[in-house]
C-alpha cells in the first residue's frame, strides 16, 4: 500500500500545471464586461455614419467641385467606413487578432465590396425586375444583407479569435436582421425621427455595433476526445 502511494505521488500530472484556456470574450459578456468600450464603438460608428451624407451634401453644394471619379471614390470610401470601424473596434474589444495591416486590408476589401454594390444597383434592370414582381422594397434589403454577409466574412477571416471558434449563425441572423430593419427605416417615414436629422444615424450606429458583436461571437472550442481527468483514469490523489 505504501509503495502504491509513493508511485502515485511521483506520477506526472501535466493537467494540473497547464493554465486553463482563456474564455472567449463575446456577445452579451462583451457588453457586460466592457460597456464603455461598446459605448465608444457606438459613438465612433455614429460619427463615421453621419460623415457620409454630410460629405456628399457638402460636395454636391460646392459650385467648384467636379463630379468625376474622385467624387465617387470619396463617396465609396466614406460609405465603407461604418462596417469597417464597428467590426474593427468590436474585434479589438473581443481580444481578436487585430493589427494595423489587417485593419487596412479590411478597409480596402470593404471599399471594393461597396463599389461592387453600387455597380450592382446601377446595372440592375429595375423596370424588368418590377415587371417580374420584385419591387425595390425587396431587392434593396436582399442586396444589403448580402453585402453585410460579405463584410462579416471578411471580419471573421481577417480578425480570427485567439481562442474558440467563430459562429456563422450569428453572422447570418444579424446580417438579415439589420438589412430588414434598415429597409423598414428607409421606407417608413417617422415624423419624430424626420424632425431630428441625427436620429436615424444614431439608430444605424447602434444596429451596426450590435451586428458586429453578433458577427464576432465566438464559441469555446470543443474539448478533445482524448483529454482525460483523474476521475476518468480511476486514480485517487493520496
Image (cartoon, rainbow, N blue to C red):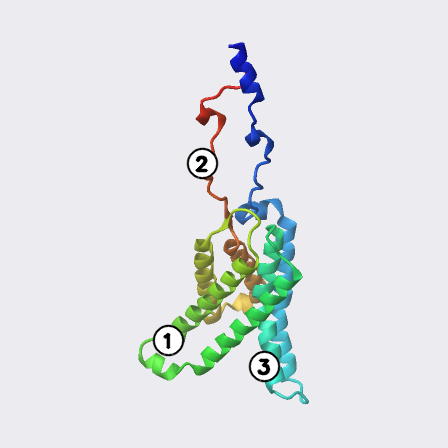
Label 1 residue SS: loop
Q: Secondary structure at mark 2?
A: loop
Report which residue position mark 1 lands on. 135
- Give the x, y percent position of residue 17: 60, 31
Foreground residue, 229 or 24? 229
Distance between mark 2 and mark 3 Cα atoms: 56 Å
135 and 75: which is toward the camera: 75
* Residue 51 rendering spot, x and y as whole percentages: 63, 71
Query: Is there CB contact under 8 Å for labels 2 and 3?
Result: no
* Residue 47 image point, x, y percent: 64, 65
Foreground tag (2 vs 1): 2
For this view, does 186 lie left or right of residue 71? left
The residue at the point 50 percent across, 56 percent down is 215
Nearer the observer: mark 2 or 3; the answer is: 2
Considering only vertical position in the picture, is 209 above or below 48? Answer: above
Which one is nearer the viewer's eye here, 42 or 202? 42
Indicate the position of residue 108 as horizontal and vertical percent values: 59, 70
**Residue 196 visible, this orientation:** no
Question: Which quarter of the rendered picture does the C terminus lie within?
Answer: top right
x 56%, y 64%: residue: 83
Task: Identify the residue under disc 3.
Answer: 72
Instruction: From the image, tell me which residue sits under label 2.
Output: 226
Distance from disc 2 to disc 1, alpha carbons, whole Å, reads: 55 Å
Kind of element beneath mark 3: helix
Please tell me which residue is depicted at 54% across the width and 47% down the height of the picture: 28
Residue 109 visible somewhere in the drawing: yes
Of the numbered discs 2 and 3, the one sitting upstream in the chain is 3
Crowding at label 3, few (<14), some or many (≥20) Cα neighbours within 10 Å?
some
Residue at the far left in the pictured view: 132
Q: Residues within 10 Å of mark 1 (few under 14, many from 20)?
A: few
Amino acid at each position: 500500500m505504501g509503495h502504491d502511494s509513493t508511485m502515485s505521488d511521483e506520477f506526472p500530472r501535466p493537467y494540473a500545471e497547464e493554465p486553463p484556456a482563456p474564455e472567449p470574450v463575446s456577445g452579451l459578456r462583451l457588453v457586460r464586461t466592457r460597456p464603455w468600450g461598446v459605448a465608444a464603438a457606438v459613438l465612433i460608428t455614429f460619427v463615421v455614419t453621419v460623415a457620409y451624407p454630410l460629405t456628399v451634401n457638402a460636395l454636391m453644394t460646392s459650385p467648384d467641385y467636379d463630379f468625376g471619379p474622385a467624387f465617387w471614390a470619396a463617396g465609396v470610401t466614406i460609405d465603407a467606413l461604418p462596417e469597417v470601424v464597428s467590426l474593427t473596434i468590436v474585434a479589438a474589444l473581443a481580444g481578436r487578432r487585430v493589427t494595423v495591416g489587417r485593419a487596412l486590408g479590411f478597409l480596402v476589401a470593404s471599399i471594393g465590396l461597396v463599389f461592387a454594390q453600387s455597380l450592382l444597383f446601377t446595372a440592375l434592370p429595375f423596370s424588368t425586375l418590377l415587371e417580374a414582381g420584385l419591387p425595390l422594397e425587396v431587392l434593396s434589403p436582399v442586396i444589403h444583407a448580402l453585402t453585410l454577409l460579405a463584410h462579416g466574412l471578411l471580419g471573421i477571416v481577417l480578425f480570427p479569435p485567439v481562442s474558440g471558434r467563430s459562429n456563422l449563425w450569428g453572422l447570418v441572423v444579424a446580417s438579415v436582421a439589420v438589412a430588414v430593419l434598415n429597409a423598414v427605416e428607409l421606407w417608413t417615414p417617422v415624423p419624430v425621427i424626420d424632425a431630428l436629422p441625427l436620429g436615424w444615424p444614431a439608430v444605424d450606429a447602434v444596429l451596426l455595433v450590435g451586428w458586429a458583436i453578433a458577427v464576432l461571437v465566438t464559441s469555446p472550442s470543443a474539448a478533445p476526445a482524448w483529454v482525460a481527468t483523474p476521475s476518468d483514469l480511476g486514480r485517487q490523489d493520496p
